[in-house]
Image (cartoon, grey):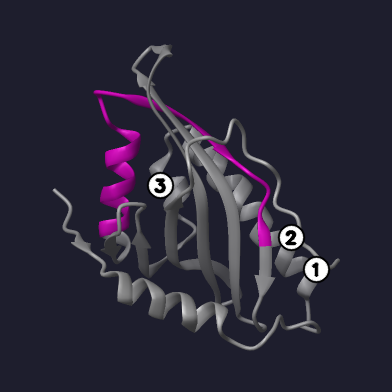
Amino acid sequence: MFVFRRMSGGVVIAIMMAFFGSPGLAEDVPGQDSDIAALEQMIHDRETAMIDHDVEAALSQFAEDATWVNSQGYYFVGIDSVREFHRYLAQNTERDYEYIAGEPLVRLLDETNAVVYYGWRMIWHEPGNRDNVITDEIGIMTLTAQQRNGEWKWVAVTVQHTPYFYEEIEPITQIGD
């Protein structure tokens, strides 16, 4: 059984202000193109791992001290807790899922810190019967990455649901580019 705590709204707002109220995008980060490509590849690799129900492949991208906040506001602290949550998703015998990730948007904050956003969709269905949909979830993930020992690792993830009336995940576009 995994241990979780519900995060208060004030804590969520404080975290958002800490990340989004910071100075603008670091425009001249050395190695910026290769860092962006590496972070985008991590999202694509995560999508493959989730489709394959490969918990260890998904978790190989996380730092040991990672924090995961799920869409209901529960948070999981440390890799073992994050692993248990992912096992709950991937090894659920009462329902199975299809996982779809949208194209990521990468924001480098400096040489060793980045925030990555991407849309996601999980279509939960009866095991062995994709036509019997139980729940169709859609949302956006916000992942904070740090470069540690020359390798990018997810250190904090927040998952948000978006309204259920969207039929598909639209690619994220940047305004002003």
Residue plotted at (54% across, 43% down): 120
Give the x, y percent position of residue 13: 40, 75
Residue identified by numbered label 2: 37
The residue that disc 3 covers is 56
Using the rendered view, name the quadrant where residue 95 is placed.
top left
**Of the residues under marks 1 and 3, which one precedes in the sequence?**
1
Question: What residue is rendered at 80% in x and 68% in y?
Answer: 33
**Alpha carbon separation for disc pair 1 and 2:** 6 Å
Q: Label 3 sits on what residue type?
A: Glu
> As drawn, which residue projects farthest toward the bottom?
23
Tell me which segment is drawn in magenta: 81-105
Q: Which residue is mark 1?
A: 33
Name which residue type carries label 1: Asp
Residue positioned most to the left: 1
Quadrant for the C terminus, please: bottom right
Using the image as rendered, state which of residue 2 and residue 158 is in the foreground. Answer: 158
Secondary element type, mark 1: helix
Q: Residues within 10 Å of mark 1 (few under 14, many from 20)?
A: few
Q: For marks 3 and 2, give the one nearer the viewer.
A: 2
